[in-house]
Image (cartoon, rainbow, N blue to C red):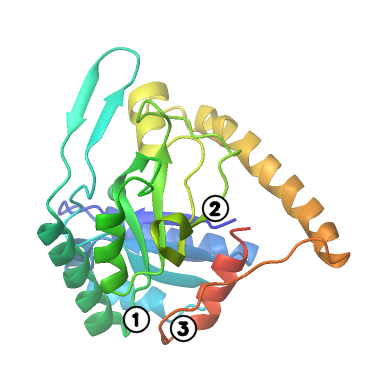
Amino acid sequence: MLIGYDVEARAAADVTPRFLEQARVLHNRLGVPATLFIVGQTLEQWVSEFQAIAVDPLFDLQQHTYSHQLLKTVHIDDGKSIRVVRGVSLQETRHEVRKASQLLRKHLDVESIGLTGPWCYYRGLRDRPDILEVLWEEGIRFTRTDGRNEHDWHPVSMDLQPYWYQALGFPEMLEIPIHGWHDCVIRAEVLGWEDLEGYVESVKPYIDRAANEARSSRCASMTGAASVRIPRCAPRKRSSATRKARACAF
Ligand SMILES: [Zn+2]
């Protein structure tokens, strides 16, 4: 399991430093690793705060593009209306990814190999080898872009498990889907931000299933029935956290 957070607030309010501080306290209390997928503009706004969390071995830092542009068009059918939001061009995608990578390198000494696609998409990038090619050329080796169901809506079933983009010619590019609901969608559009308990209840079945399956996969692994292949990736400063986070994705 990969616990990932998109860190993307770009308003003047101090929501980002407060989140970083609380996430650090919580994950250290539990001893659980996590990956932060950071929007470049957010990093520019809070450099020293991100530098403080970058030294924490529990946190792996990756990117969420420079300015949160969609890589692929979404056609959202939430049962009430249809909403279409267009993805940007390949040229803009390259610019978005490259600029975010440059910022992570410059401010955090991190080589970015992981990316969450803004908004996420049905089927991830399985229908867009052209986008995958750009990401590969920009050094990305694992993606988190498959995070909407067949209506480009939610939830996404946990039956959808991580996969390689092998059939598209990228056998070493790993997709790690996002399950359930995007928290900002279920809380803003379904439950309301005040209903924290409802949100916790909505997440619990996913966590329980992940915990149960992790237990059975550990047993299978001990008997030699399961094998896990970790993608080769560009050397980066804090590779141990990445290995930990990605090993847990299975
Ligand atoms: Zn986002």
Mark 3, residue position: 238
Q: Secondary structure at mark 2?
A: loop
Mark 2, residue position: 162
Looking at the rendered structure, the kind of residue marked 2 is Pro
Q: Position of residue 206 (x, y in %)?
A: 61, 39
Residue at the spot 41% in from the left edge and 54% down from the top edge: 144
Q: Look at the image and tell me in which quarter the N terminus lies.
A: bottom right
Q: Looking at the image, tell me whether mark 2 or mark 1 is earlier in sequence order.
A: 1
Looking at the image, residue 245 lies above or below residue 70? below
Q: Quadrant of residue 95?
A: bottom left
Q: Is residue 178 visible?
A: yes
How many numbered marks, from 0 up?
A: 3
Residue sitting nearer the eye, 238 or 137: 137
Q: Looking at the image, tell me whether mark 3 or mark 2 is earlier in sequence order.
A: 2
116 left or right of 198 in image: left
Which is closer to the viewer, label 3 or label 2?
Answer: 2
Q: CA distance from mark 3 to mark 1?
A: 7 Å
Looking at the rendered structure, the kind of residue marked 3 is Arg
Q: CA distance from mark 3 to mark 2?
A: 23 Å
Q: Position of residue 14 (x, y in %)?
A: 25, 56
Do the CB atoms of the residues marked 3 and 1 lie less than 8 Å apart?
A: yes
Q: Is residue 7 visible?
A: no
10 Å neighbourhood of mark 2: few (<14), some, or many (≥20)?
A: some
Q: Position of residue 193 (x, y in %)?
A: 37, 31
Residue at the spot 35% in from the left edge and 31% down from the top edge: 152
Residue 110, numbered circle: 1
Q: Look at the image and tell me in which quarter the C terminus lies.
A: bottom right
Q: CA distance from mark 2 to mark 1?
A: 24 Å
10 Å neighbourhood of mark 1: few (<14), some, or many (≥20)?
A: many
Looking at the image, residue 125 lies above or below residue 224? above
Looking at the image, residue 39 lies above or below residue 155? below
244 left or right of 84 in image: right
